Amino acid sequence: MYHRLWIFLNGCLALISIVYIWLFSPHDNSLVVLAQLLAQLAMLLFIVNINMYFIFLVIRKTSIRKVKIRLAKFSRYFMKWHIPIAVLGTSTIIGHAAINLYAIAPLLGWGHVKLWSGVLAMVTLAVVLFAGWLRHKKASGFRRRFHLTAAMIFLVIFLVHMFIPV
Ligand code: HEM
Ligand code: HEM
């Protein structure tokens, strides 16, 4: 069953991020630690939203009726949280970005990839939100692909940003 692999991958991602942020990137400055905490929270929220893709995928592909009905019910309930999760994640990551631009950017220098990848992730997030809003207003094949593609590109960029060492 694929759902085990899917839960396993989610668990791995959460665990790797926790280990990386809290064991491999320690800081003394409590403001910077707060920025890390905000980033950790936000990335987990974003991953929850990205998981909607896999839930919809299983609903479309499964031939087990019980699974289809259960997941359809679950997703209908859970989608009520999709926009609040996006808004909360975005507010949180704005705090992260503001602190890092203020406290770390002058130390790293403006050419550092950690900063640029962060800015790029922020821009991609704006595209995801815009595409989500379009899709929310009126769904179409293009709008669905646009929101989905933007979300997956955002995932890749923020993971790259996260793992770039300072
Ligand atoms: C203008 C935008 C951004 C800037 C300037 C920025 C800057 C930074 C910096 C300097 C760090 C290293 C902090 C440290 O070592 O304590 C960092 C870490 C991190 N950022 Fe961003 N970031 C931005 C946007 C984002 C976005 C949109 C995400 C999406 C989830 C994100 C996720 C993370 C994560 C998970 C970490 C933790 C990894 C680590 O501790 O090195 N950031 N960011
Ligand atoms: C953090 C930001 C967000 C991420 C990562 C995200 C990610 C996703 C993903 C991966 C899907 C499943 C796509 C599919 O399988 O076709 C989805 C569906 C959707 N998203 Fe988002 N999204 C975000 C924000 C938003 C926002 C702000 C809105 C609306 C204002 C929105 C509206 C929707 C709608 C309407 C669907 C379709 C639900 C359905 O088919 O029943 N999303 N989102």
Image (cartoon, helix red, strand yellow):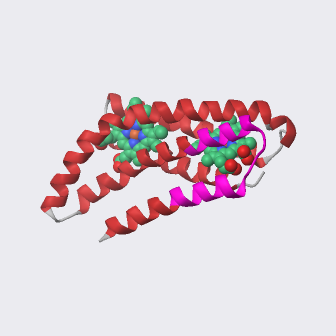
**Residue 147, quarter of the rendered image:** top left
Q: Relative to residue 147, is residue 99 drawn left or right?
A: right
**Residue 109, quarter of the rendered image:** top right
Q: Residue furthest bottom?
A: 1
| Residue 107 in magenta stretch | no
Q: Is residue 127 above or below residue 15?
A: above
Q: Relative to residue 63, is residue 119 drawn left or right?
A: right
Q: Is residue 30 above or below residue 155?
A: above
Q: Position of residue 119 (x, y in %)?
A: 68, 38
Q: Is residue 132 above or below residue 65?
A: above
Residue positioned 61% across, 37% down in the render: 122
State the predominant SS element of the stretch in magenta: helix
Q: Position of residue 156 (x, y in %)?
A: 57, 53
Q: Residue furthest left?
A: 65
Q: Relative to residue 10, is residue 105 drawn left or right?
A: right
Q: Position of residue 6 (x, y in %)?
A: 39, 63
- Please state the total of marks drawn on the protein image: 0
Q: Is residue 68 visible?
A: yes
Query: Quarter for ligand 2?
Result: top left
Q: Position of residue 75 (x, y in %)?
A: 26, 45
| Residue 39 in magenta stretch | yes
Magenta span of residues? 13-40
Q: In which quadrant is the N terminus drawn?
A: bottom left
Q: Is residue 148 visible?
A: no
Residue positioned 54% across, 59% down in the render: 15
**Residue 105, quarter of the rendered image:** top right
Residue positioned 53% across, 33% down in the render: 90
Residue positioned 71% across, 32% down in the render: 99
Q: Nearer the viewer, residue 1 or 127?
A: 1
